[in-house]
Amino acid sequence: MEFTFSKRARTLSMALAVIGLLLFVLGYFTAGEHGAEHLGQRLWANLLVCGFFFFGISLGALFFYALQYATETAWTVMVKRVYEGMFAWLPIGSAIILLVLLGGSLHWHHLYHWMDASLYDPASPNYDVIMDGKRAFLNQPFFWIRSIAFIFTFVFAAHWFRKESLRMDKESGETLVKSHLKNYRRGALFLVFFAVFSSVLAWDWLMAIDAHWFSTLFGWYVFSGMWVSAMITAVIVALYLKSKGYLPQVNNSHIHDMGKWVFAVSFLWSYLFFSQFMLIWYANIPEEVTWIQTRWEHYQVLFWVTFFINFAIPMVMLISRDAKRNPRFLIGVGTVIFIGHWLDVFMIVMPGTMADHWHLGLVEVGMFLAFLGAFVYVTLNRLTKAPLTPVQHPYLEESIHHSI
Amino acid sequence: MANKVIYAVYDDPEVLKGAARKLVTSGVKVKDVYSPFPVHGLDPIIGITRTRLGIASFMFGITGTSLALLGFWYFMISDWPMNIGGKPNWTLYHNLPAFVPVMFEFTVFCAAHGMAITYLIRNKTLPGMPARNPDPRSTDDKFVMEVRTEDNHGHSAEQITGMLRETPVFEINEREY
């Protein structure tokens, strides 16, 4: 069945983006004298927060999509278009990230302290021996090669998977199986690249904000955040489509399984968050604790709120089977955790860029809403382009009869 | 009249599901089905209620967390405050992060063991217990449906066997008990 992007949904998502933009502009002009001092930095930091959060959702969707091929999972076939819709955002999200990185390279902002050339000049008073030691990895040419390689790989893979998926709709018999096996191999290959790139991009784009600090767990921590955000978005989009009468063959078991993913990956995130925190807390080495200390001193409430929302709420609310089969409940809890994971990205970016001058006001909320509206628009728009239920897939029949 | 138990043996789970649905719609209560593997979608047909093992497991887990906390409080704080790496040791909550891994492990330990043991006791399949399987072939490639006359006062044993014969049944065995 073809999905038609109803006029109402079109207007609503656009309105969300416009309202967000208006709030953002309002926040910009009402920042006042006190806020104006750091306004430039604040805008760029926010662009990175929202840019990365929504990029992460579409990348998480792409990762999960490839994972389904690589593991030859049958039940997700019914909802595979939802993931395809979500990674439609990938080129736009990548462009925003590149814009932020470019801004750093051209010194429009100072999110990435390591990009300051004077740190590496022994004659300069800014000379930083630690940063000089990291130069083999953190230098502009290599940084740009990496960033472009990541983005190129992801955008290319997203484009390729989508193209293959549409082609499979027109195939049958032998050729269909052949295409599927090809996707299976490409899915596995993509996962290999993703395993390395997802960690390194977290170091490059987020950990490098606090360039003196490092954590070997950081890549997984960021990755689990992307993954869980993607799982939440997927279940919310699927439930929205179902509530409008689309995807009639997606039954309770599919929704239950998607809910399980939200639950399970929330735990993965909590596990990694805590593992990173506890090792730093226990070792108590100055070069490591700085990261936690900034958060503890200036962001204590948010620190707790983020951990509470992203750990305790899914744990308590989604543990029972009935909860995961209740659409309204799932949407409610999902929305809360969704915001929680945006806060998590906020907590990764802001302390290193704004320190104690951070705000959580109209600028932040406005930009979040603007991105959300645009993301929803792009996702739903992509869904109109192909039949919502895949026409042909070797596992289509098995997926229809999914029952747990 | 002695009670009778009827064992209808099938060689395909889908056929068995169809037969069970037919029997249940004509008001026959199916006592149980023995099969070599779990048959999807069978439980609601023969009216088996959902397992409460999950709830039990949750309780075991909570017990584990509480016991671990209690243990930590007694061993590490109350009885003999231990100075490990200069970490605060005068209150439980100051040192909580260090205890979380063990609390987590103990929760998993209690939940998993509690659940497994409960499962074995409830099914009467603890090691050494006699097998309650009516037909050894149901551990190989046959699916056995058990119908008891004491559950079905509306139908006689002949009526039930008659109904079963209309389905593609492999074999029917009757036994008095």
Image: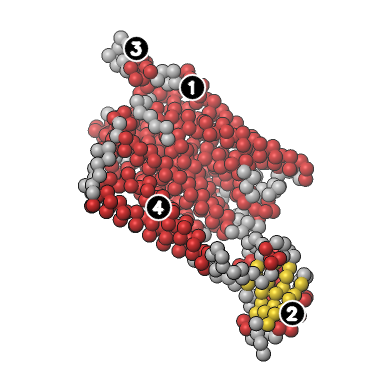
Amino acid at the residue labelled 2? Thr
Q: Is residue A59 above or below residue B18?
A: above
Q: CA distance from mark 1 to mark 4?
A: 46 Å
Q: Which tag is nearer the camera, tag 1 or tag 4?
A: 4
Residue at the spot of label 3: A121
Disc 3 marks which amino acid? Asp
Q: Name the residue carrying label 1.
A: A144
Q: Residue at x 56, y 65 (%)?
A: B128
Residue A217 visible in the shown view: yes
Q: Is residue A54 above or below residue A120?
A: below
C-alpha separation, residue under disc 3 versus residue under disc 4: 53 Å
Callout 1: chain: A
Residue kind at label 1, given as amino acid type: Trp
Question: Residue A250 or B59: which is nearer the viewer?
Answer: B59
Q: Is A218 left or right of A245, judged from the image as shown?
A: left
Question: How many angstroms separate mark 2 from mark 3 (CA)?
Answer: 94 Å
- Residue furthest to the front: B128
Q: Which residue is mark 2?
A: B161
Tell me the subunit letter for badge 3: A
Q: Do the residues bearing badges 3 and 1 touch, measured as CB atoms within 8 Å?
A: no
Look at the image and tell me whether residue A370 can be seen. Answer: no
Mark 3 or 1: in front is: 3
Q: How many marks?
A: 4
